[in-house]
C-alpha cells in the first residue's frame, strides 16, 4: 500500500513539471548533491517589508527534498550557466524545500 507522503511526493514531482521546473546542478560545497535536480524559480517573489511600509522583491527557489535532501544556506544551484546561492531558508515540509536565493 502506498503511504500518504509517497502520494504527496508524487504529486509534487508532477506539479513541478507543470509549474515550469528547470533542471540544474545542486551543489553543497565542492560536492554535487544532484546533477539533474528540478527547481521552480520565482524571479519576482514579493514579500512585505519588515516595517510593513513596502514590499521586497526577492528570488525564491523551491526544490524537491527527495532530490536534494535538506536545503542549507550557502548551497548552490546552477542552471543554464546562472548560479544561485541559498541565502535564507523559507520552509521545508519534508517534500518541498523553499529558500530565498541570490544570483552571483
Image (cartoon, rainbow, N blue to C red):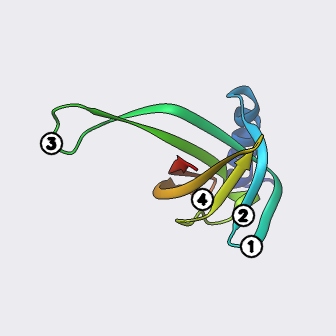
- Left or right: 36 in relation to 22: right
Q: Which residue is mark 3?
A: 51
Which circle, 2 or 4, is nearer the viewer? 2
Q: Which residue is mark 4?
A: 94
Q: Quadrant of residue 79?
A: top right
- Identify the residue at horizontal 58%, vertical 56% (top origin): 85
x%, y% of residue 96? 61, 50
| Image marks 2 and 1: residues in contact by CB distance under 8 Å | yes
Using the numbered discs, state the Cα–Cα distance from disc 3 to disc 4 in whole angstroms: 31 Å
Mark 1 is surrounded, within 10 Å at the Cα level, by few (under 14), some (14 to 19) or many (20 or more) other residues, namely few
Which circle, 4 or 1, is nearer the viewer? 1
Say above or below: 27 vs 95. below
Among the two numbered marks 2 and 4 on one chain, the one whose residue lies closer to the N terminus: 2
Res. 30 mark? 1
x%, y% of residue 43? 53, 33
Mark 4 is surrounded, within 10 Å at the Cα level, by few (under 14), some (14 to 19) or many (20 or more) other residues, namely few
Using the numbered discs, state the Cα–Cα distance from disc 2 to disc 1 in whole angstroms: 7 Å
Mark 2 is surrounded, within 10 Å at the Cα level, by few (under 14), some (14 to 19) or many (20 or more) other residues, namely some
x%, y% of residue 71? 59, 62
Among the two numbered marks 3 and 2 on one chain, the one whose residue lies closer to the N terminus: 2
- Identify the residue at horizontal 15%, vertical 33% (top origin): 53
| Image marks 2 and 4: residues in contact by CB distance under 8 Å | no
Which circle, 3 or 1, is nearer the viewer? 1
Q: Quadrant of residue 1?
A: bottom right
Using the numbered discs, state the Cα–Cα distance from disc 2 to disc 4 in whole angstroms: 19 Å
Amino acid at each position: 500500500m502506498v503511504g500518504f507522503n509517497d502520494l504527496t511526493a508524487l504529486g509534487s514531482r508532477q506539479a513541478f513539471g507543470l509549474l515550469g521546473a528547470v533542471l540544474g546542478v545542486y551543489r553543497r560545497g565542492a560536492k554535487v548533491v544532484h546533477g539533474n535536480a528540478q527547481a521552480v524559480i520565482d524571479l519576482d517573489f514579493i514579500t512585505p517589508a519588515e516595517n510593513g511600509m513596502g514590499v521586497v522583491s526577492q528570488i525564491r527557489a523551491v526544490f524537491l527534498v527527495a532530490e536534494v535532501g535538506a536545503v542549507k544556506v550557502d548551497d548552490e544551484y546552477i542552471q543554464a550557466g546562472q548560479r544561485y546561492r541559498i541565502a535564507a531558508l523559507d520552509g521545508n515540509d519534508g517534500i518541498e524545500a523553499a529558500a530565498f536565493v541570490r544570483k552571483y
